[in-house]
Amino acid sequence: MTQSITITLACPPQKLKPNVRSHHMAKASATRTYRAHAADAAMDECEVHGGWEPIAEPKVTITYYHKTRAFMDRDNILASLKAAFDGFTDAGLWTDDHACLYMPIRREKDAEHPRVEITVSEGHDIAWH
């Protein structure tokens, strides 16, 4: 049976966006907070599914719901989610994020509920060396 789970997170804070210049202590604090937020959300979702076995080769699908039509670049979205992926590692979604296969990122507008939905599923057949 293929495992699949979708975790919904708040959009990453401004300080985690790669083009934002902020004091390193402020960025470190935002990173810690968002990482913990992601780990908690992942563990909560795993409980709903009745447990979870860490995936060795996860496939990650991201849908980013922006508040406005001013969409962030896809590569910047991925970079701003690094703390979330580390939180998923902490929560035990996967054994390590070095083997993640990131699918093309979808961007949508949702002014009422901006968020990030990340679906993690097992299995891709790309070998990383």
Image (cartoon, rainbow, N blue to C red):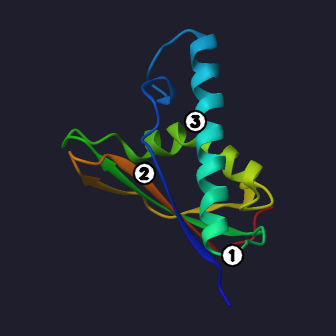
**Disc nearest the viewer among 1 and 2:** 1
Q: Which residue is mark 3?
A: 34
Q: Earlier in the sequence, mark 1 or mark 3?
A: 3
What secondary structure is found at the residue carrying circle 3?
Answer: helix
Position of residue 58 in the picture relative to residue 62 (left or right): right
Quadrant housing residue 105: bottom left
Quadrant where the C terminus is found in the figure: bottom right
Between the C-alphas of marks 3 and 2, the distance is 12 Å
Q: Between residues 26 and 41, which one lies in front from this camera angle?
A: 41
Between the C-alphas of marks 1 and 3, the distance is 24 Å
Quadrant housing residue 106: bottom left
Circles 1 and 3, Cβ within 8 Å, touching? The answer is no
Around disc 1, counting alpha carbons within 10 Å, would you say few (fewer than 14), some (14 to 19), or many (20 or more)? few
Which residue lies at the image location 78% right of the left edge and 72% below the top edge? 53
Circles 1 and 2, Cβ within 8 Å, touching? The answer is no
Question: What number is the disc on residue 116?
Answer: 2
Which residue lies at the image location 76% right of the left edge and 58% below the top edge? 92
Q: Amino acid at mark 3?
A: Tyr
What secondary structure is found at the residue carrying circle 2?
Answer: strand
Between the C-alphas of marks 1 and 2, the distance is 23 Å
Question: What number is the disc on residue 50?
Answer: 1
Q: Amino acid at mark 1?
A: Gly
Around disc 3, counting alpha carbons within 10 Å, would you say few (fewer than 14), some (14 to 19), or many (20 or more)? many
Q: Between residues 119 and 49, which one lies in front from this camera angle?
A: 49
